[in-house]
Image: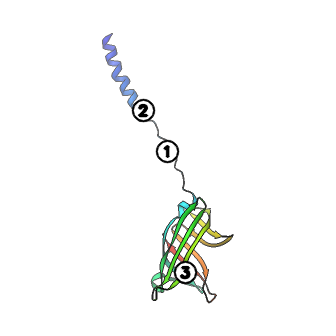
């Protein structure tokens, strides 16, 4: 009878180790909220105006846009787009509490007081504006 106990104990231990190590560990992946998904530093990459799109190296502009999460659906925006040749301001300032709306498929819109002024598609941020001469433009920046 002692021999049968000595044979069963190692088998039971092997069975327990196998069962415990084969258990599936459920880890639900939680998608980040809209503000978290888009937060970060975006570097100026192109300018569009009067129907023309120019890459950053063909313009006299430089700079970045920083989006900081405030809540799940609000971000603060710090714009620092300057004129390279003079380092003067082109689009510099902050906007607190811009609304972020998840459009799905990695696309988001940015608005303030119900006026949409920007979009994010993947890693690409576009911001629409009007310069002091009344010319509409779009600044594009990449994360």
**Lower sequence index among marks 3 and 2:** 2
Q: How many marks?
A: 3
Question: Residue 71's image quarter?
Answer: bottom right
Residue 107 lies, with reference to residue 133, above or below; the image says: above
Residue 71 lies, with reference to residue 8, above or below; the image says: below
- C-alpha span from label 1 to label 3: 44 Å
**Lower sequence index among marks 1 and 3:** 1
Residue at which label 2 appears: 20
- Residue 133 in the image: x percent, y percent? 62, 90
Front label number (3 vs 2): 3
The residue most toward the top is 1
- Residue 53 in the image: x percent, y percent? 54, 83
Neighbourhood count class around disc 2 (C-alpha, 10 Å): few under 14, some 14–19, many 20 upward: few
Q: For numbered disc 3, what is the local secondary structure?
A: strand
Residue drawn at x 53%, y 68% is 67
Location of the N terminus (image quadrant)? top left
Residue 9 lies, with reference to residue 55, above or below; the image says: above
Residue at which label 1 appears: 27
- C-alpha span from label 3 to label 2: 59 Å
**Relative side of 130 to 17, left or right:** right
Question: Residue 131's image quarter?
Answer: bottom right
Residue at which label 3 appears: 91
Question: Which residue is at the front of the view, 10 or 43?
Answer: 43
Question: Residue 110's image quarter?
Answer: bottom right
- C-alpha span from label 1 to label 2: 17 Å
Question: Which residue is at the front of the view, 68 or 21?
Answer: 68
């Amino acid at each position: 009878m002692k021999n049968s106990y000595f044979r069963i104990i190692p088998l039971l231990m092997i069975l327990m180790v196998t069962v415990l190590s084969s258990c599936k560990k459920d880890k639900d992946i939680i998608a980040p909220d809209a503000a978290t998904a888009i937060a970060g530093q975006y570097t100026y990459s192109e300018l569009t105006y009067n129907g023309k799109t120019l890459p950053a190296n063909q313009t006299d502009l430089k700079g970045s846009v920083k989006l900081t999460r405030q809540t799940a659906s609000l971000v603060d925006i710090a714009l620092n787009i300057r004129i390279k040749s003079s380092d003067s301001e082109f689009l510099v300032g902050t906007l607190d509490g811009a609304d972020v709306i998840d459009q799905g498929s990695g696309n988001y819109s940015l608005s303030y007081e119900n006026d949409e002024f920007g979009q994010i598609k993947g890693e690409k941020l576009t911001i629409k504006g009007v310069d002091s001469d009344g010319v509409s433009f779009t600044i594009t920046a990449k994360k």
